[in-house]
Image (tube, rainbow, N blue to C red):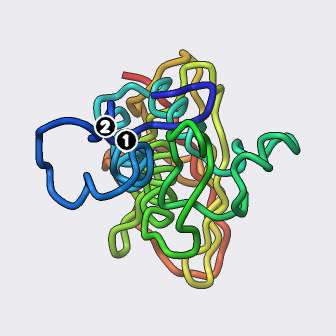
Amino acid sequence: MNEEEGIIALLTPPFDTTDQEPGYIKSYVPGIRENGGQYTHAATWVVKAFAMLGEGDKAYKLFSLINPINHSRTPIEANKYKVEPYVVAADVYTNPQHLGRGGWTWYTGSSGWMYTVGLEDILGFRVIKDRLYIDPCIPKDWEGFRIEFRYNNTKYDIEIINPKGINNGVKCLMVDGVSIDNKYIQLIDDGLEHNVIVEMGS
């Protein structure tokens, strides 16, 4: 991991002069693509793994590290990154001649993975058929956040509160002021507006 450059490399050091034969990866220039660069598919899975372990601070830090917008905060960073700051790059290079340069934008499925990891694993928002599960894994210093969700013709205003400053765990769910025992919210399409409060805790 290279925090300064915002890179989570797939492996390090790259295969170059080694006698090992890992296959086609070695055909890439060292520090490019899978051969020692950031392969963003794998980087998003690293974020997912830390979220699954309940390490919200680490998961969010790594998510922010690979977020393309954070590669373009200044003209110098944008010039180094050289690709669109609003598109996830399949690769970010560690090769000294191209350090921090993105590659293969508009092509990678890792953009979908990054969206899914951010929404489902960090914010904890997951819809399965007509059930809504909310189980966040966030940084301890987040006091909470809000999500506005539309289920067909019905609006759900969701507020997640984190009064004890923890990474994960849900203490209670309330829908329209009524506490529910389930670990999910049964979605209904009644055309009304519903208020959901999720209090984090053990």
> Mark 2 packing: few (<14 Cα in 10 Å), some, or many (20+)?
some
Would you place residue 106 above or below residue 168 in this image? below
Residue that protrudes farthest toward the top in the picture = 164
Give the crowd class for mark 1: few <14, some 14-19, many >=20 residues within 10 Å: many
Q: Quadrant of the N terminus?
A: top left
Question: Could you say whether the residue bearing mark 1 is in a helix, strand or loop?
Answer: loop
Q: Residue sitting at 32 percent across and 48 percent down?
A: 183
Would residue 75 appear left or right of 93 to someone viewing this image?
Answer: right
**What amino acid is found at the position of numbered circle 2 in the picture?**
Leu
Query: On screen, 96 above or below 4?
Result: below
Q: Is residue 85 left or right of residue 25?
A: right
Q: Residue 59 location, x and y as percent?
A: 45, 33
Q: Which residue is mark 1?
A: 36
56 lies left or right of 52: right
Residue nearest the viewer, comparing 83 with 66: 83
Q: Position of residue 81 (x, y in %)?
A: 69, 50
Relative horizontal placement of residue 176, taking residue 26 as reference (left or right)? right
Q: Residue at x 54, y 29 (%)?
A: 61
Tell me where residue 83 sits by quadrant: bottom right
| 1 and 2 marks in contact (CB < 8 Å) | yes
Horizontal and vertical percent position of residue 196: 57, 51
Q: Residue at x 58, y 68 (%)?
A: 105
Q: Residue furthest right?
A: 75
Closer to the camera in the image, 131 or 37: 37
Q: Identify the residue at image location x=64%, y=64%.
A: 87
Quarter of the picture containing the C terminus is top left
Which secondary structure lies at badge 2? loop
Rendered image: mark on residue 11 = 2
Foreground of the two, 174 or 44: 44
Whole-number angstrom distance, CA of label 1 to CA of label 2: 5 Å
